[in-house]
Image (cartoon, rainbow, N blue to C red):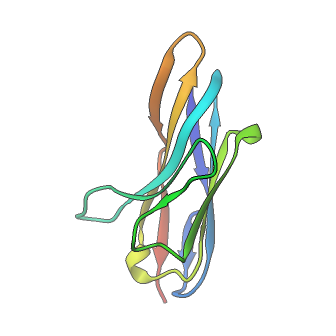
Amino acid sequence: QVQLVESGGGLVQPGGSLRLSCAASGSIFSIYAMGWYRQAPGNQRELVATIPTGSSTNYADSVKGRFTISRDDAKNTVYLQMNSLKPEDTAVYYCNADLGIWYEGRHDYWGQGTQVTVSS
């Protein structure tokens, strides 16, 4: 069974930093892409950043220059370094992974979410 386990959320003051981690486990033979999305109360879930296979990355305009996504394929883990956090970054952050699973093929998975609150 495939699981995505997120960690690193919490309460931080404006201007502060947090680092989110998401580790995928299970019968994984390939990682096609990983990414982070977020959902604030009353809003739809939105893309924050993605990192497809290779060195390319994609960011929402609202986080460019402040957030950095990276991945460690040896650990099946994706990270999101968040700097210069703003109150509007407050949301539940979800990890997403497009994975190749032995005997099951290619599927899309979501983590359970981790709360990030930016407040003084």
How many numbered tags mark residues here?
A: 0
98 horizontally vs 20: left or right: left
114 horizontally vs 23: left or right: left
Q: Is residue 86 above or below residue 60?
A: below
Q: Residue at x 56, y 24 (%)?
A: 100
Q: Is residue 5 above or below residue 36?
A: above
The image quarter in which residue 24 lies: top right
Q: Residue at x 48, y 62 (%)?
A: 115
Q: 75 or 91, which lies in front?
A: 75
* Location of residue 89 in the rendering, given as x and y in whole percent from the top left corner: 42, 74
Q: Residue at x 51, y 87 (%)?
A: 14
The image quarter in which residue 40 lies: bottom left
Quadrant where the N terminus is found in the figure: top right
The image quarter in which residue 46 lies: bottom left
113 horizontally vs 82: left or right: left
* Location of residue 37 in the rendering, given as x and y in whole percent from the top left corner: 42, 55
19 horizontally vs 95: left or right: right
